[in-house]
Amino acid sequence: MKKGLFILLLIAILLPAHAQESGIRFFHGTWDEAMALAKKEKKKVFIDFFTEWCGPCLNMALTVFPLPEVGEVYNKNFICLKIDAEKGEGRELAKKYGIHSYPSYIFVNPKTEALIHRSGGNKPAADFIADVQGALNPKLSSIYLNEKYKSGKYDARFLIDYIHNQKVSGNRNVQKDFDKLIAMGKKLTDPEIWELYADCIGGYNNPYVKEVADHYDEFVRLFGKEAVDTKLTEATAYAPIAFTESLPEFEGKYYNLKTAELTGLFRQNKYDEAWEMVDRLARDPKIDQAKFVKLLSFYTRVNPDYNDNQLTFEQLAKKVKYTRYVAYNMYDRDEAIPHHYYASALEYLIKRAQEEGKQIPADIYETPAYGKEKYDMRHPSLKQKPKR
């Protein structure tokens, strides 16, 4: 065998194994074997309880578990198991640990098989890694935090840890606890409290957005304009137009106002006005176009089983034109959904044309009036490789 061919075959064999090793290494033996191995290696046990029909479970398995930084933390500290809660011994184990939602993440002491920390949900890698602290530090365990919280006997330091834990575990309904923290004398201007607010308290329906707005210059001086504007943008993403207009100027205000107006048109089924506004915003240099395209992907989905079968053929054709615009301008190679929507929209448009004896409008075949001109997954900033 030629040396070059041998090297290529070796790479083909080794690469998949290396890719698998980069994330969490799941143990494939029995429960008893896993407990024995954990005792031998002096590790705790992590279990991902999943089902075959659970979308968030699959998303975590595809996007978070394979990450090198996730594997580094979990492989170092745990024997890791994936257990289908509806098959084999998974049924009894799910019952034993009180599993009622998926995905559920359970951390166990192998010596006693006692639950030491519980979490779950579809979450970013940073939160999933933060879960480890609950399993390794008894004072950050969900078991300890929940019991102490129920007692009502705790201080501000405990409440900060509790709110962090709730957020990491997927519960963002913690404003009442944040309110308690402020009532204990903590200030939004304290760096730790600001960070907690920025990470854990969402939306505009709280007193803190107004506090930041009323003392905008002070918060910018303390935490920087980018951090403050990012929080105000996030907080007012779904706020009423009048509320956002009452705030001082911040980066993101114009975008939120315009998209709130557009959302209102779609909700009132004023499609012609909405599409005209889309045309204006798609050409507006003050609009973050990448962010706008992601928002627009929600409104351009064609679903004949929902209400698109009620659109006239002409209305459907116009919607498909914007479905195409989204597909042309989504460059994330891991994001296939907009392209699926574009393909299914075209299929449905062709079906309706045949059924109703209509001609597909010529602009469906033309280059889009704005945005990217070629339909591919290549980012427009990426240059072609020179020909040799």
Image: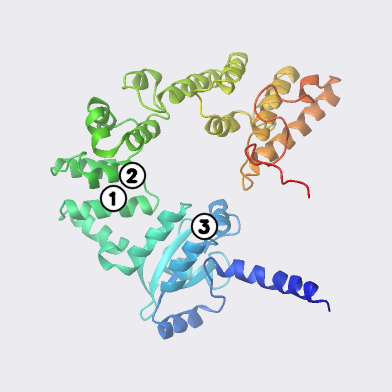
Query: Could you say which is closer to the camera, residue 92 or residue 10?
Result: 10
Q: Nearer the viewer, mark 1 or mark 3?
A: 3
Callout 2: helix, strand or loop? helix
Q: Answer yes or no: do the residues labelled 1 and 3 have beta carbons within 8 Å? A: no
Which mark sits nearer the N-terminus, 2 or 3? 3
Q: CA distance from mark 1 to mark 2?
A: 8 Å
Q: Answer yes or no: do the residues labelled 1 and 2 have beta carbons within 8 Å? A: yes
Residue 375: x %, y % from top left:
73, 35
Q: CA distance from mark 2 to mark 3?
A: 21 Å
Colour convention of the picture? rainbow
For image coordinates 27% across by 68% down, the residue present is: 138
The answer to whether residue 99 is left or right of residue 349 is left
Label 2: few (<14), some or many (≥20) within 10 Å?
A: some
Q: CA distance from mark 1 to mark 3?
A: 23 Å
Picture disc at residue 200 = 2
Which mark sits nearer the N-terminus, 1 or 3? 3
For image coordinates 77% across by 76% down, the residue present is: 6
Quarter of the figure with residue 229:
top left
Label 3: few (<14), some or many (≥20) within 10 Å?
A: many
Mark 1 belongs to which amino acid? Ile
Picture disc at residue 64 = 3
Residue 156: x %, y % from top left:
17, 51
Task: Please identify the quadrant where the N terminus is shown.
Answer: bottom right
The answer to whether residue 14 is left or right of residue 1 is left
